[in-house]
Amino acid sequence: AVLLKASGNGGTLTHISGSPFNVRIVPAASSARGSRLVGQGLSLVVAGQEGSFTIEARDGYGNLQTYRPSSSVPFGVVLTGPSTRVCSIRDFEDSSFVAIYNVTVSGLYTLTITAPSDTASHTLLVSPAEYWAGTSYIDANLLTITAGANPLVEVSIRDLYNNRIVAPETESEITSILCSVSGLGPLSVIAKDGNFLIAMNLTISGRYQMDVSVGSGAISSSPHSLVISAGTFSAAASVVSGSGLFDIAADRAAILTLSPRDALGNAVDISVRDVAV
C-alpha cells in the first residue's frame, strides 16, 4: 500500500482522493546471474551419463519469479568444449527449470546459461567412463624389443566412447589390467606419469603371443605378436666347441664351432669377419 498526502491550508497533510493505493511490484526480467543454480551437473559428470541441474528463476535482485504459463522458457543452456551440446530444458511450472544434457567426449567444457537480461558461465568437467576392453589397445610398433632392455610398453586404456583414461597416481601394481606372455608367464602393469605401462622384464629372445585383458575381456588389439630380439654379441657369453679345442694333429685341419651369444645367452647372428682365431 502507498500512502499519498497533499499539503492543505496551514501545511496539514491530507489524503488525496483514492489514497492509499495498492501497488504490486513484480520481479524484473529473469537473470542468469541472479537465478539460483543447484546440482552436481553444474561442475562434474561422467561421459555417457545424463547430467542435470536446476535453475530457480530469479531477477538480478534475487526476487523469485512468479510462475506464468508460457510456450517458451526464459533460459538457454549450451555446453562448449571438446564437443558442443545444447541442453534441453524442462519447465517444472513453479518458476524452476531443469537443464538436461548427455556428453560422450571427456574434457573441460564451458557451460553457458543465457537469460533475458544477462548470461552466466560455469566450468564443467566431463570425466571418462569405466575401462572398456573393446576400445583399449597397444601400438604394435612397440612390441619389438631387445632382451634385457626392460622397456615400459604403454597400454592405451579407453572407455566405451574412446576417451583416454589417465592412470591413477599409485606405486602399486594395476591389477585390473592383466598381461601374460605365452611360455613366460604374467607381466606387471604399473602407472607412471598418467600412463598405463607393461614392465617388459624379458630376457629370452624369440617370438611370443602376448595377451592383455581389461576386466573380463581382451583389449581390441589382443592377442599381440611380441618379438624379443637378442642383444649385442658378447664374446664372454659365447660358446666354442669342437675336437680342435683339445687334440690337434700336425698338418691336419682343426675344426672349431662358435655359437655366438649375447650377454644373456641368447643366440645372436654375427658376421664371419667379426671372428678372429
Image (cartoon, rainbow, N blue to C red):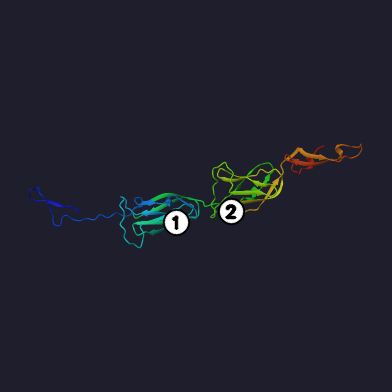
Q: What residue did someone put label 1 on?
A: 101
Q: Is residue 86 left or right of residue 175?
A: left
Q: Is residue 147 left or right of residue 257?
A: left
Q: Where residue 94 sits: x, y (%)? A: 34, 58
Badge 1 density bin: few <14, some 14–19, many ≥20, Cα 10 Å: many
Q: What residue did someone put label 2 on?
A: 133
Q: Nearer the viewer, residue 190 or 277?
A: 190
> Which residue type carries mark 1?
Tyr
Q: Where residue 97 sits: x, y (%)? A: 37, 57
Report helix, strand or loop for mark 2: helix
Distance of label 1 from label 2 (alpha carbons)? 26 Å
> Which residue type carries mark 2?
Ala
Report helix, strand or loop for mark 1: strand
Mark carried by residue 121: none
Q: Where residue 155 sits: x, y (%)? A: 60, 48
Which quadrant of the figure contains the C terminus? top right
Which residue is the extreme one toward the bottom? 71
Label 1 vs label 2, nearer the camera: 2
Give the quadrant of residue 100. bottom left
